[in-house]
Image (cartoon, grey):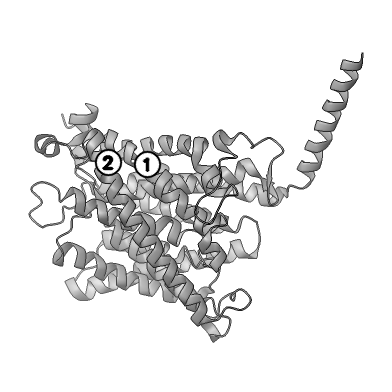
């Protein structure tokens, strides 16, 4: 009888605790973050997958699609095992603790702010998924599937997770007051720098002859680009972690920056080459989205237009510099679009968040910060993330190459990775 009473008391207490926890959850915020979580996953699957797939040769279309799906699976499990706890559990200035390994502390009644913790970690997981998926664009058409998966797992643990903790998990950059609303440092600079390092380390595609290969299926790329644009509303708007004015403004400035950057890119093309290209239109759009990401919660509409204009011009010039002058085969322009875009936005927010710029005024800085002091923090963050990512990425590329050999053979590369790796083809040409 005593045992039964004890069980009843425990059950009653557990139910009461659960009810209390649920009462602290804001249903509107929760619904919004559920929606944005789906939107951010949609950015990778199928958005980024289709965007990249259309840009490669027809004989490699499945390899890119498969790499995006494989990364989504591998990173999800890595986040479950150790990624989330090292990024967001209490630890030190550089890395989180292990109290949530295998998500052992995440229960039905766990709360993060006023949304369920399970939802917060899932939202963050979708960011972790898309970041290494961005990198594959730098070495598309020449790296083994197994090597891509292994590198992505190691990269998430040793690059993405520490930087996430620095910026969003209570680490040293967050303590300094860095502004990165949705991932300029965490996502775009880290992915862009790693992509540049990988492109140099692995080398150019075979028979490239210093000429960019035309996309094999541009409509596929345009469809993927449209999905990225829509999904980015969740990426930036969801980073407010609430259904409020910050989220609404983040969506507005995201849209304006993308539109401005796309227009700027094709205007430069029009003047320089005589014709605006559809590929330039969608590439410029992605550059504008990358640049506004760190600033989206802090700048106003006019500031977003300025960021989009800078991104369109700078990303265009960076693309030409990398391919034409430096002869670096960043296959799908990851560094000049995401890396340069992320740097532009991360620095620009140090100025455009100021409330004293008239039409360009933003939300304002934390107490005690001025444009000068905020810019100082932003520059330190860019330098630190760039240096750390580059060094660790080189080590991981060498380790991956030792363990499973990064690059396919010349014969496999010429034949196409779809057949040599997957024994499948994207198109039935009979």
Q: Which mark is residue 154?
A: 1
Q: Which residue is mark 2?
A: 399
Q: Secondary structure at mark 1?
A: helix
Q: Is residue 428 above or below residue 268?
A: above
Residue 157 locus on image (x, y percent)? 43, 44
Query: In percent of the image, x 53 and y 66: which residue is there?
Result: 252
Q: Which is more toward the observer, 133 or 279?
A: 133
Q: Residue 361, how many percent across, how many down?
A: 55, 80
Q: Specify the quadrant that holds the N terminus.
A: top right
- Locate residue 268: give its quadrant: bottom left
Q: Is residue 337 above or below residue 157?
A: below
Q: How many marks?
A: 2
Residue 122 placed where, x, y %?
55, 42
SS of the residue at dot 2? helix
Q: Nearer the viewer, residue 195 or 233?
A: 195
Question: Is residue 253 shown left or right of residue 424?
Answer: right
Question: Closest to the observer: 377 or 322?
Answer: 377
Q: Is residue 369 above or below residue 325?
A: below
Q: Is residue 215 found left or right of 378 in the rendered image?
A: left
* Residue contact between numbered discs 1 and 2, judged by CB atoms under 8 Å: yes
Image quadrant occupied by the C terminus: top left
Which is more foreground, mark 1 or mark 2?
Answer: 2
């Amino acid at each position: 009888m005593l045992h039964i009473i004890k069980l009843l008391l425990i059950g009653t207490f557990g139910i009461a605790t659960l009810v209390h926890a649920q009462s602290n959850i804001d249903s509107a915020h929760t619904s919004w973050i559920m929606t944005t979580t789906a939107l951010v996953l949609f950015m990778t699957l199928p958005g980024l997958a289709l965007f990249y797939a259309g840009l490669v040769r027809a004989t490699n279309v499945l390899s890119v699609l498969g790499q995006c799906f494989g990364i989504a699976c591998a990173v999800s499990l890595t986040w479950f095992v150790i990624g989330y706890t090292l990024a967001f559990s209490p630890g030190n200035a550089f890395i989180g603790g292990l109290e949530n390994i295998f998500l052992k502390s995440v229960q039905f009644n766990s709360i993060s702010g006023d949304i369920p913790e399970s939802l917060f970690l899932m939202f963050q997981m979708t960011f972790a998924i898309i970041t290494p998926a961005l990198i594959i664009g730098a070495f598309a058409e020449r790296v083994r599937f197994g090597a891509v998966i292994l590198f992505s797992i190691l990269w998430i643990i040793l690059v993405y997770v520490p930087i996430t903790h620095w910026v969003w998990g209570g680490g040293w950059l967050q303590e300094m007051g860095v502004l990165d609303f949705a991932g300029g440092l965490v996502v775009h600079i880290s992915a862009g720098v790693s992509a540049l390092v990988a492109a140099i380390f692995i080398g150019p595609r075979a028979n490239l002859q210093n000429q960019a290969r035309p996309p094999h299926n541009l409509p596929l790329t345009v469809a993927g680009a449209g999905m990225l644009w829509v999904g980015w509303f969740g990426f930036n708007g969801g980073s407010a972690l609430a259904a409020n004015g910050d989220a609404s403004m983040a969506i507005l400035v995201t849209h304006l920056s993308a539109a401005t950057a796309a227009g700027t890119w094709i205007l430069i093309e029009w003047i320089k080459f005589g014709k605006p290209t559809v590929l330039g239109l969608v590439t410029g759009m992605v550059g504008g989205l990358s640049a506004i990401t760190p600033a989206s919660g802090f700048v106003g509409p006019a500031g977003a237009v300025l960021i989009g204009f800078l991104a369109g011009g700078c990303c265009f010039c960076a693309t030409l510099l990398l391919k034409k002058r430096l002869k670096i085969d960043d296959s799908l322009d990851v560094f000049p679009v995401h890396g340069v875009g992320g740097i532009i936005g991360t620095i620009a927010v140090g100025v455009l968040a100021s409330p004293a710029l008239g039409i360009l005024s933003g939300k304002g800085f934390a107490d005690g910060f001025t444009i000068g002091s905020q810019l100082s923090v932003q520059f330190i963050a860019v330098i630190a993330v760039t240096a750390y990512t580059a060094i660790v990425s080189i080590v991981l590329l060498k380790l991956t190459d030792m363990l499973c050999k990064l690059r396919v053979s010349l014969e496999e590369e010429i034949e196409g990775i779809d057949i040599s790796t997957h024994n499948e083809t994207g198109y039935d040409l009979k």
